[in-house]
Each structure stands twice: as C-alpha cells, then as structure tokens.
Image (spheres, helix red, strand yellow):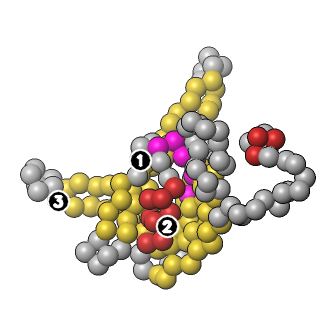
Amino acid sequence: MAKGINKVLLLGNVGKDPEIRSTAGGMTVASFSLATAERARDAQGNWSDKTEWHNIVCFQRTAEVVRDYVKKGTQLFIEGKIQTRSWDDKTSGEKKYKTEILCNELTLLGGRGAEGGSTSTGSYSGASTRSSASSSTSYDQRQPATTPDYGDSGITDDDIPF
C-alpha cells in the first residue's frame, strides 16, 4: 500500500483566547479554535461567506509562543496534520470523537497594529516555530531589533503604512 500524506495548511483568525495547560510530564499544551472563511457566489449570484472552525493543538515551544503572543483575533498561518481522537463519555457511555489539527509550524501574522487595534501582537512581529509531541523542538523566533535599521533616516513607526 502506498504511503499517505496528512498535511494541513490554514490561514485564519483565532476565535477565543487559547487554553494553556501542562501535562503530568511537564509538557506545555495550547488549544484554541481557528476560523477560516471562504467566499463564494450562491445560485442568485450573491456573495456569501462560509466560516469553518478548526480545533488547533500546539505542543512544547510552539505552545509557549501561543501562550505569550496569541489572543482572540490574532491572524495565524498554521501547518500541521489532522488527527481524530475518540473516547467513551463517562456520563452517557457513548463514544465521542474530536478532530484536531496538530500544529507543526505556526506563523504569527498581522504585524504590530495600532494602539487599541484588535489584531495587535504587541512588540512581537512574527515567529516560525516547529514542534511535535514526539520529536525534538527547533525554532526560529524573531524579536524586533533594539535599534531599527533606518535609525538615521528619520523614519518612524508612524510612517509605515501597516
């Protein structure tokens, strides 16, 4: 039988503040919902939006980045894989299922935003992290420079259109 591919690419906005927890072994886990939207024309030619909600789970260093920089409304690009868990409900005894995206890479989008902006990520301008529950973590975390490259040109953050 041929080897299969399980890869997910999502670009969307966080639906509510992430839930952060730790396992008994001390691993950090972050869970949150991500909304993706698709726009299409209906039979009458009117545009309509369809929102799909995805359950995202991040582990280790990626979960720490989520804890520190992600909140409701943050725009993210997620790379990961689909996993469906099942368990028996303790109260009803019936089998329950939950499909989740296990995040392998997370990129924060949206830039700094203006004061009071809904998608502001504070002073953190972006991150690209890789993490999985079964492998070692490598990451490239980019922090803003303490002195901007354009320091002598007179350009300020207010001059930048985004």
To which residue does mark 3 refer?
88
Disc 3 residue type? Asp
Q: Nearer the viewer, residue 89 or 55?
A: 55
| Distance in Å between CA atoms under marks 2 and 3 | 29 Å
Is residue 69 toward the left or the right of residue 142 in the image?
left
To which residue does mark 1 refer?
17
The single residue placed furthest to the bottom in the displayed view is 136
Q: Position of residue 141 (x, y in %)?
A: 61, 69
Residue at 53% x, 33% y is: 50
To which residue does mark 2 refer?
62
Q: Quadrant of residue 133?
A: bottom left
Element type at marker 2? helix
N-terminal of the pair, mark 2 or mark 3, is 2
Q: Nearer the viewer, residue 121 or 32?
A: 121
N-terminal of the pair, mark 1 or mark 3, is 1
Residue at 56% x, 66% y is: 105
N-terminal of the pair, mark 2 or mark 1, is 1
Q: Quadrant of residue 145?
A: bottom right
Tell me the quadrant of the picture where the C terminus can be found.
Answer: top right
Element type at marker 3? strand
